[in-house]
Structure formats: C-alpha cells, structure tokens
Image (cartoon, coloured by chain):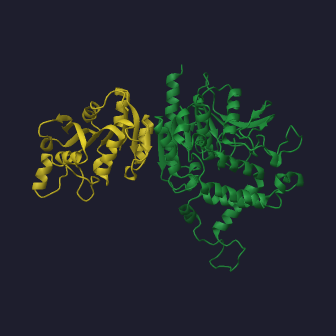
Amino acid sequence: MPGFFMSFIATPQTMHFPEALPLQSGASIRDYRLVYETYGQLNADKSNAVLVCHALNASHHVAGVYPDEEKSEGWWDNMIGPGKSVDTNKFFVIGVNNLGSCFGSTGPMDVNPDTGAVYGADFPVVTVEDWVNAQARLLDRLGIGQLAAVLGGSLGGMQAQSWTLQYPERMRHAVVVASAPNLTAENIAFNEVARRAIVTDPDFHGGHFYRHGVVPARGLRIARMIGHITYLSDDVMNQKFGRQLREGLDLKYSTQDIEFQIESYLRYQGDKFSTYFDANTYLLITRALDYFDPARSFGGQLAQAYARAQARFLLISFSTDWRFAPERSREIVKALLDNGRQVSYAEIDAPHGHDAFLLDDPRYMGVMRSYFDNIAAELAKEGV
Amino acid sequence: MSDTATMQAIAALIPAGARVLDLGCGEGALLDFLQRERGCTGYGVELNDANVLACVRRGVNVLQLNLEDGLAMFEDNSFDVVLQIDTLQHLRNAETMLQETARIGRSGIVAFPNFAHWPNRLSVLRGRMPVTRHLPYQWYDTPNIRVGTFKDFEVLATKNRLRILDAFGLDNGQIVRRLPNLCASRAVFHFEHA
C-alpha cells in the first residue's frame, strides 16, 4: 500500500484478568490476558461501542496499521475506519483477540499458572460461549454496559450470535456475516482433516512441541491448504488460476514438482501460515467451530434458542460461499422471524466464496454502511 | 407503486399496529409509510440489490429472497397482512404465490395492473398490445409475464377458495368502484383464506 492510502495507526493494548473464568467444559482459566485494540472515541454515555469478533486465523487487529510495518492493515480495514462503512468517527470499535489464540491473548504457548509449565496441548478447550464470556468481562472493565452493535464474520458471526443469546440486553444490534447456526458434517469433516494433518506431523509431539524446539509446520501447511480451498469458490479459483502452469507451456511429467499455479498458490499460503500460526491454537479454534450449536440444548430447535435474543439483526451471506452457505444464514433468519424479531438479510451475489466477507463488494459495503449509519442516527436521536 | 394516493388507498385496508409482510417491497416506501403512519411492524421481501439497499437505508426490515424459491421460511398465519403490490404479475408461479400469501397472512392484499382497462382494450382492438403509463413495456420485453384482469382475479380467487373482503380499482390515484374492470388501470383485492 502506498503511504498516501495508508490507514491510521493502531495500538494493541493488554488487559490482565486475575480472577478465574469458568469454562463450559467445567475447567477454568485464571491469570489470563486479553489483547485488544480500539478505534474511535467512546462517547460520554458509552453507547457507541461496536465489538468486532474475529474468525479462525484473525485477531484483535481489525483495522489500522502498525507503524513501519508493511502490509499491516487490519483484517477488516476495508470496512472499519474513519469515514468507512463502520465509521470510527461515529463508533468506538473494539477488536479483541480470543483466549487460546496465538496473537497475544493467553494461549497454548503461555505458562499455566497452576503448573508453571507451558500449556501446550493442556490448554483447556474453549468454546464460542467461553470467548463471549471473556469478551463480556473485557467490556465490564472498559465500563461498557450495552454495545451499539456486536459484529462478526464466519466464526466471528457465531460469537455475535452467541452474544445475543448469552447477554441479550447487552447490545442493540447484531451483525452476522457469512456465518451459520452450527457447522454441517462436511464442515466438521474439513476441520478434522486439518486437525489430523497437524496431529500426525512427527513434530507435533502430542501438542508439546515447544519443549522440543520444533513446530509441526507440515501439518499446519496442509491444514491451511485445505482451509484455503474451502474459503474460495470453484469459479474464482478457475478465474484466478485455471489450469495455468507456473512456468512455460509444457508438462514436466513429474509427480512432485509444483507445476500448476494453484499448487504454487496453496503451497505459498501454507508456508506463510505455518510461520506464524500455532498448531494447538488451530486445533482449539476448529474445535470451537465444531462445538458451536445454540440449538443443541433446545432439541435442535433454533427458533427456541433464539427466543432469548432481543437485538435487532442484520445478516449477510454470499451466494458462492459453500462453507457457510446462504441457506445457513436463512436458518437464522427464520429462527428470528419465528420469534418476531427485527431482522434484515442481504444475500450478496458475489463470486468469491467464503472469502467474500473480507473483500470489497460495493453492495456488501453499501448495506453495511447504511445499516451502521442508521445505528449512529438512532444513537444521536436518543442521546443528549 | 409510488404515488401517495395509491399507497394511502392500500394503507387504509391495513389495521393500525398490524404485523405486515410485503412481498416484492421495492424500495420499502409502503412499509416505511405503514411503520410511521400506522404503527405497523414487519418485513419486506425483495430480490433486487438496489432495492434491498434502499430498504436498509430507510430503516425498513428487508429480506433478500427470491419469491420464486417459495415462502417456506414463513409460518402459517404468521402475519396480519401479506402484501403483493405489483408483484404477482412478475411471478412464474403466480397462483402458488397467491396461495402462499393466503397461507402466511390472516389476510392478503394484492394489487396489479388491470389488463381490461378500456385503453388497453382499445389498443388490442386496434391489433396491438397496449403500451401505456401503467403498462409501459413492449410485449417482447415486459416483466409482466402474468397479465390478467380484475375479473380474471375474481375467478382465480374463487378457484382458490379465497374470501374477498374488498375489491376495487384504482385510476389516477382515485378509487374506482363502478365497473372497475373497465374503468380502472389497477386492481386491488383484499382477501382472506376460508
């Protein structure tokens, strides 16, 4: 990015929580920290906060850039910032890194205060609900009672959903993008293949690879390659890579060389990922995805689960997203309709598959902007 | 469906505070009007991207769905009123959609261009399909794939055992109760399922 277009400077902050957080599994975690970033100003009555929940491989770094770091734009920098669809001149936006992550909040690479040893594979299994509870504590400490909106895409959208069920009064609006009320068997299957790739890497050492000074990079690479395929659509992959060869026009009659562009791309993505992502975190986060299922305690009746929700909802899905398909968003819409809740739903006809939720589509951004402008107008009308 | 008179004529059929589903809600003007003026709540259903955006912008709940995919998402009798204002004539499954409208709503309101309006009849007598202010398309590019008349709808309603609560024509913003099949450019039916 040329300097001219550079976004604002973001500064990560850390909050320490000495008191134990009870987890859904029955375990608990104490003396943990959450890393977060905030953009914009919290208004006097603390009503303009927007919490952004992150997906699998993202973090608290939602928008802005880090000084002197190239390509350090936050993962939703295209949508969030001064004058953008979610306008930080109007909203106080909070991005928070979830427990178990590898981007700063307490995770498997940290020391367990109970044992004095690095958690590794012993880091407790955390769920979407646990993350929401941890985020709620952060809001308590920031003095924010009610959010203007909770916002998330994909797994982040699951957290946004869960917020409306766990703390129905703590937000006015919930914006759920490219998400689902639970994972399908196919989705769990993809996660399982990724996990097996990691766990069967000889460098994994049962999750205690830190002790051995190695990283199960092969497993992580393959996990990422599989993930990446599922985030794209067949169309966009064909358009981007087709059957293009990496060099020249001739087949090499090799079985192990990188010949097709798509192979090269996937390997590049896998390599990059394996240098910065933690294997135990990958296992934890994919498990949280698998487990999320608010209808489970209501005999599979999503409408019953949603009876508690009070927020006004905006749901957005993308036509070519087969990982979190539009049908899945429509299930949430139906559950809200059945409860007479306020909901709008946009189904964006975009070619990019699941990845579309991170990209700039004018229809998507237009709906976001209009929706958040209305929230801002609503706050302005009620405040003062 | 943009002129205020038409909107008011239809709004007058809708009880204050009603829960409304507007199928093919366009830019959401009618729902917006019903929310502000009559304390109604509800949702619009719309397929067109620009219209969906317009609805979001004006703060009307909108669901981007294709009516041709059916309305299984909506439960029986889950709305006080289901509207199909200038929608029916665009739908391949017009009859199914009418049945669905009756199923979902305690009552339904349908409005559509009346093909038997006298200028249209004259045009056909002259041997040409009508091109008017209300039917501004040529026969080969019209989105109105189900052209019917006031009387045709009465027959369809009877066939589907719908009880007609009220029916009238609209022309130049005026309600037409005398010979609506001849004198009105648009037909409005308010009905409920038996």
Q: Is residue B54 above or below residue A255?
A: above
**Residue ID at (62%, 43%):** A156
The residue that appears at 20% across and 38% down in the rendered structure is B167
Residue A305: quarter of image: top right
The percent position of residue A343, horizontal first and vertical second, equals 48, 38
Residue in front for this viewpoint, A240 or A110: A110
Q: Residue furthest top?
A: A384
A214 relative to A230 in the view: left or right: right
Q: Residue shown at 19%/37% (left/top)?
A: B168
Along the horizontal axis of the image, is A381 left or right of A260?
left
From the viewer's side, name the closer residue of A294 and A172. Answer: A294
* Rendering colour (chain B): yellow
Q: Is residue A368 visible?
A: no
- Please tell me in which quadrant of the rendered image residue A258 appears: bottom right
Q: Which chain is drawn using green?
A: A
Left or right of residue B41: residue A162: right
Q: Position of residue B84 (x, y in %)?
A: 31, 42
Q: Is residue A376 visible?
A: yes
Residue A238's spot in the image, x, y percent? 56, 66
Q: Is residue A259 above or below residue A45?
A: below
Q: How many marks?
A: 0
Q: Residue furthest front?
A: A299
Quadrant placement of the C terminus of chain A: top right
Which of A313/B143 is in front? A313
**Relative to B6, does residue A183 appear above or below in the rendering?**
below
Picture coordinates of residue A109 (x, y %)?
82, 46
